[in-house]
Image: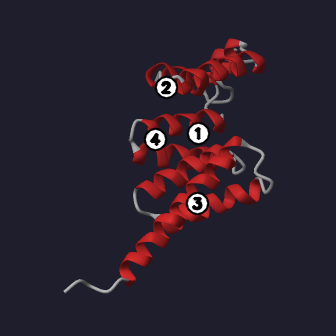
């Protein structure tokens, strides 16, 4: 006996996107609008849009990564790290997730882990063509500069 799409959704066999019939191009348009809102600083609007996209397609790594970016912008580093980690579990090639997690780790002092994430971005995009990998390179450079300055400061003789 065939089951209805709603029954399949309730059992977790299909996503809300599949039940609703919303296609990929419409979801992409929604994500572009949400990202524009994020760029404009309309974080609450962007968050609601990306959460809606996740409700439609919970396996969308980009959507989880985008939420991590919003969390970073709002200073919620723990959520940013967790969401980025989840995005990576869904798609281990999601550049934005590594950049967002790396920044969250860097800002919480977990520097070796941050460096690993930035290295992974460089591995995934060795030519640095993706804007996210350019951001990772800038973050990694600032991390390197901060470590270098701290090292130089620690080698200065103490003042009498």
Instruction: Rate crowding at label 4 as few (under 14), some (14 to 19) or many (20 or more) other CA atoms within 10 Å.
Output: many
Q: Residue at (54%, 66%) from the top-left corner?
A: 144
Distance in Å between CA atoms under marks 4 and 3:
19 Å
The reply to whether discs 3 and 1 touch (Cβ–Cβ < 8 Å) is: no
* Rendered image: mark on residue 72: 4
Q: Which residue is mark 1?
A: 65
Distance in Å between CA atoms under marks 1 and 4:
11 Å
Comparing 108 with 13, the one in front is 108
Residue 59 visible (yes or no) = no
> Where residue 19 appears, x then y in whole percent?
68, 16
* Of marks 2 and 4, the one in the foreground: 4
Q: Residue furthest front?
A: 160
- Left or right: residue 101 versus residue 121 is left
Q: Residue at (65%, 23%) from the top-left corner?
A: 31
In which quadrant is the N terminus drawn? top right
Q: Residue furthest right?
A: 127
Location of residue 67 with respect to 107 vertically, above or below? above
The reply to whether discs 1 and 2 touch (Cβ–Cβ < 8 Å) is: no
* Badge 4 element: helix
Q: Which residue is mark 2?
A: 47
* Badge 2 element: helix
Q: Residue at (47%, 56%) from the top-left corner?
A: 105
Distance in Å between CA atoms under marks 3 and 2:
29 Å
Distance in Å between CA atoms under marks 3 and 1:
22 Å
* Of marks 3 and 1, the one in the foreground: 3
Residue 121 picture quarter: bottom right
* Badge 3 element: helix
> Where residue 107 appears, x then y in whole percent?
43, 54
* Rendered image: mark on residue 141: 3
């Amino acid at each position: 006996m065939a089951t209805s799409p709603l029954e399949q959704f309730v059992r977790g066999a299909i996503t809300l996107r599949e039940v609703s019939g919303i296609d990929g191009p419409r979801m992409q348009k929604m994500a572009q609008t949400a990202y524009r809102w994020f760029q404009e600083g309309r974080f609450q609007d962007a968050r609601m849009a990306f959460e809606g996209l996740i409700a439609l397609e919970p396996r969308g790594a980009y959507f989880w990564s985008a939420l991590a970016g919003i969390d970073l912008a709002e200073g919620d580093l723990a959520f940013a790290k967790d969401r980025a980690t989840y995005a990576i579990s869904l798609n281990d090639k999601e550049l934005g997730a590594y950049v967002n997690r790396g920044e969250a780790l860097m800002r919480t002092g977990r520097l070796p882990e941050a460096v690993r994430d930035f290295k992974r971005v460089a591995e995934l995009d060795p030519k640095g063509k993706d804007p996210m990998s350019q951001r990772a390179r800038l973050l990694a450079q600032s991390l390197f500069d901060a470590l270098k300055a701290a090292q130089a400061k620690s080698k200065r003789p103490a003042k009498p």
